[in-house]
Image: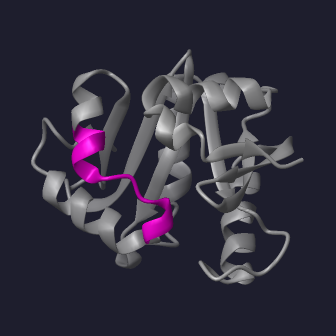
Amino acid sequence: MLKDAVQGNQLENVRKLYEASFPESEKKPFAFMLKKQKEGCFDILAIEDEQGKFCGLAIMMLSGGLALLDYLAIEPDCQSGGIGSRTLGELCGCYGKERIVVEIESTAEENPVSSRSERLRRKAFYLRNGMVPMDFLVVLFGVEMEVLTFGSEITFEQYYAIYAQVLPASLTEKIRLLA
């Protein structure tokens, strides 16, 4: 079950899992996302089970009619129980399946951030849940990324516009089309 982490009592759990789950090169300052949530550009969501236990986080960047699943992390003791898949389904209900965009580290080769097997497992998760890769790659803050949607074609320009409308120009300059 998705809950607004800022309005609820899970914000500190979200912050801790966020800090522990993502490489420094891919993290935005948490305070920046909180500020942008007040402006309607981010949704910072806690994932809870039926009993209200904290199980993970989903952070959405919202812009131009699209919802970028910027971060998704499940607590280690909650993994492999279908919570990630249920969360994707719930996100589709909240934002519209045709609007959701995901980016993952490229599965093409090794990189110093994460192992290829971990990246392949992540991609397989999204593919199992109905997402399809777009026909372009991006370099996002120095990291090669694949872009996926639930089948709705988007262009690089539409993808880039999400960032251009939310982040300062000094950061969007670090996003480019690779192929």
Quarter occupied by residue 132:
top right
Q: Nearer the viewer, residue 39 or 87?
A: 39
Please say if 12 is above or below 147. below
Query: Residue 43: percent from the left, percent from the top?
Result: 34, 34
Which quadrant holds the N terminus?
top left
Please say if 17 is above or below 68. below
Residue 33 lies in the magenta stretch: yes
> Which stretch appears magenta?
24-34
Query: Residue 105: percent from the left, percent from the top?
Result: 68, 63
Residue 97 vs residue 169: left or right?
right
Label the magenta part by its dominant secondary structure.
Answer: helix
**Residue located farthest toward the top when viewing the structure as drawn:** 65
Residue 102 seen:
yes
The residue at 36%/33% (across/down) is 42
Query: Residue 51: percent from the left, percent from the top?
Result: 20, 56
Residue 94 seen:
no
Please say if 44 is above or below 42. below
Residue 112 vs residue 43: left or right?
right
